[in-house]
Image (tube, coloured by chain):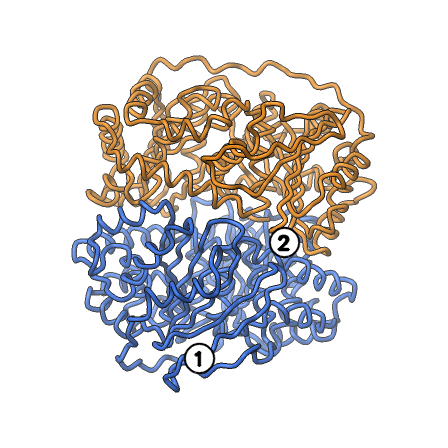
Chain colours: A orange, B blue
Amino acid sequence: MSTMIRIRSTLFSLLSFLLLALLPNPALVMAEGGPSSPSPSHSAAPSFRFVPQIHHLKNGLTLLTVNDPYSPTLTFQVWYRVGSRNEAKGRTGISHFNEHMMFTGTKKFPHGALDRLISEVGGQNNAFTDYDFTAYFENVAPDKISLPISIEADRMTHLLLKPDQVERERRIVLEERRNDYDDPTQKLVEQVYATAFAVHPYHNPVIGWEKDIQHTSRNDIWRYYRAHYMPNNATVVVVGPLDDATVLRDVKKAFGSIPRGHLIHPRIPVEPPQHHLRMTVVKKPAMLPITMMAFHAPNFKSRDAIPLVVLAQVLSGSRSSLLYQNMIYKNPVAVDAEGDYDPMTHDPGLFYFYAQGLPTTTPKTLRSHLDSVIKTIKTTPVAPSLLALAKKQILTQFVMNQESAFGMGMMFGMMSADRIPQSFLTDYVKNINAVTAADLRRVARKYLVSDNETVGYLFPTGGRVPPSFARPGRIVR
Amino acid sequence: MTSLRALSLLVRPALLSALVLLSSCAHSPAASSGSGSIPGTGGMLPASTTYPVPAMKATLTRSFLPNGLEVLVLPRPDLPLISFRLGIRAGSSFDPAGRAGTAELVADLLTRGTAGHDTLSLFHTLDSTGGSLSASASRDMTVLAGDSLSEEAPTLLELASEMVTSPTFPPAEFSKKKAAVLASLAEEDNHPSPIASNLLYRLVEKNTPYATPPGGTPESVKAISRQDLKDFVSRYYSPDRSVLIIAGDVTPESGLALAKKYFLTWNRSSSPLPARQSFQAPPASGTFLVDKPELRQSTVFYATQGIARKDPSFYDTLVFNMLLGASQTSTLNRVVRQKMGLVYYIRSAVNASRHRGPFMVYFQTYAKNTGKVMSTMNQILENSTKTPPDPQAVLAIKRQLIGGFPFLMNTTPKLAQLLLVIWSDGLDYTYFTDYPEHVSQVTPASVLAAGQHLLLNHSFVTIVVGPAKALKKAGVSGSPPPPAS
């Protein structure tokens, strides 16, 4: 299946911009059968094509449709509000394991049937698991929507989970883990997250620890499936050329009879404030050194989230960015240097820096350069031209992301999974435009401090495995 | 990183699908819904021709500027966005002997300075648009790709024009970029998939222009001088070797006007073109093992010479390939992953483009299972040439190809990229309407014949990158790879 790329931040940006334009009315949710179709009223925003319609079925299922008449394809997605964040100790990776099992068959659609049926209509299907959610999708021609409706309604409740298939899928998942984590950089990322989060489940990799994957039983998966896969824990998102009333009718027909489940909300440990610098070191065969510096940061619920989004863009969003100019262009010490932040997480996450050095550089040198850039942000106002440029790049990305029906579906699905409050979204563009250089300095001084920091070093040991950086999460079947 | 880009070309099913779908233009009839003269032969401005793009409810307009630049405009005005691609027949297969990596280094440095902009000014002008403009080189061509809001497209087109007509290759930038490329190559040369892929091309495409990696080797990049870059541009960057594709928020008239405004004064190259090596490679065989004791998995590539996009058998070959290992329902995936659970992925690919490229099967697996997977793979390949495939399976793949066609063009950047590949591979622009007809003509018998043509009487190269000790226990051994000539 295809490789996912990191898209969350840009999707978020587009989503919030769209909602700003399309959803000025806080009364977004309508009763079953009555769609809401707020009209664009924000004169300052670019004109948008999409008008989302949101419905709540009686069994708790949320349906969100977007009519995009320009798209030649349609995406049908089901988002479950469960991911590695919800996993118990000793059973990490079960969300992803269960995601694999969702393709192993029901009585109606035996193993292999889903792929075959979707392929035969020229469609695409896949799934992905993250910290906070698990999602399944089918991209098909608009007149083939009945097929994904039928498939997803069926496997929400009728998974067979045959023992022999569990064992076979376990081997595949272990191969998948070896694919990713033979890489020394992935090992470093895994260790940085595990060090930065002491008690919160973001401590664990989404794919799970190898021992847990080996020990997860068929009964574990069955209990997990029954506990989380139910209409009142899911959102169906449909984007493409469609008629909302017809989709609502067909979704109600297929999903409406599935009973509401009893959803348990076990307490997720809250990560306590960090009070001292933490370090982790990986020594493995590699060609280039790497330094990762991660700082605990708030999620979308904080007023600081918006300045942090802009700060990440100022740091590494372009050739004019601070890290590119300071570490790659003017004084080359690295082949890659980035700062990244994702506000769309259920719980507070990390603002992190990453630098992959030239062969003559050491991890400590990279850290020194990153520290220097951080110090500059804290002491010197970001140039107005750079700030303006960063904001324009974010706005341009809003519009570009509207082109893909699948991308739109991802945005709205993520929005639903993380329960993003409208107040945050409707104010998003205004708040982006309001960010000042002083705001960037303030949030840098507040969060980018050593007591709040976890540093990870990858020391090449002279062997021959190169690093390749990818943020954890968003793993695909 | 370059290494990851190279890998992704091999492992992304979406790209594989694009590859095989594009390949289906092999038998397209000569295109034209209008009339026009061949560019550069008569001196007059040729008439525009148009081609329908039904999946997007759009029309493609093709024109030529007097300097020979081909201009393709595809309006899709639903969003205020423009994507453009400037393609130049100046890929790595044109690199001078002993200077592999030249085309890519030229492309990397296009954004580092022009007669009108020094490096920092160029960065700032480009970034201020909020859009993107990048340059890269593949084996067949160099591409400048711009994506932005409509209002910023003129700025990016002007920059692109400067980049191809007056690049300056500032000495300091040349040194810095060369150091960065060498660092990336050092890294790439030790990564399992790039090692295997580069070795595959070196052995299977031996003595052809495709044999060397687009990024070059540490030795070849060290040998490249600034003068080499200037010579390369002078020789190959010419409007009559190029296409400008503008898609999105434009009309045929406004798109052509933009092309004229920024590229009309681009002069044709007067440098003579050197003769190229033949694309006919000698047969290669053998198993080669690259020891990586620190890994738990092995990476295996099994390859032979394939065919070009315009090969008469390609249409049937693409269906054969889909059935074998390029789809979710393929035999390799069904048996080795879904039944045996031995791999996360196993795929086959026909890397055909303007010229013949390799056919390959590739996978990663726990080292101890390598022999078992290789044995199963060989059995599946052998069986695929014995009897015609199940007619229902062929029908299903044909439906998949036709039904999946719109996914190649459902955004403006994808449309622009698709047009670029059509141009590069010398396919006809009737592609958008001919496609279903070509797919529908494939039969089980023609698929079998294509598979036999591809696999029988061919020698294969096997490349294994992994821990030799564990592989030996699994019954897998091989020779050290031969040194590059």
Q: Are marks 2 and 1 in contact (CB under 8 Å)?
A: no
Residue at horizontal 47 percent and vertical 36 percent from the top: A45
Do the residues at pointers 2 and 1 share their chain? no
Q: How many marks?
A: 2
User: Residue B390's quadrant in the figure?
Assistant: bottom right
Taking B23 as reference, is B8 left or right?
A: left
- Residue A72 is tagged as 2
Q: In front here: A257 or A142?
A: A142
Instruction: Give the letter of the chain under mark 1.
Output: B
Question: Which element is circle 2 on?
Answer: loop
Q: Chain of mark 2?
A: A
Can you give x and y, in whole percent of width and height, for residue B18 in the image? 56, 60
**Residue found at the very far bottom of the displayed protein:** B42
Q: CA distance from mark 2 to mark 1?
A: 33 Å
Q: Is residue B346 above or below residue A216?
A: below
Q: Which sits in the foreground, B328 or B298?
A: B328
User: Quick one: SS at disc 1?
Assistant: loop
* Horizontal relation, residue B199 to residue A422: left or right: left
In the displayed structure, would residue A12 be above or below residue B482? above
* Displayed quadrant of residue A220: top right
Q: Judge whether residue A268 can be spotted in this image.
A: yes
Instruction: Please name which of the two marks, 2 or 1, marks the residue nearer to the observer.
Output: 1
| Depth order, front residue of B59/A141 | B59
- Residue at 26 percent across and 46 percent down: it is B124
In the picture, which quadrant includes the C terminus of chain A?
Answer: top right
Q: Is residue A459 visible?
A: no
Residue at 18% from the left image edge and 57% from the top image edge:
B170
Residue at 49%, 37% in the rendered image: A14
Q: Amino acid at mark 2?
A: Pro
B322 left or right of B269?
right
Mark carried by residue B46: 1
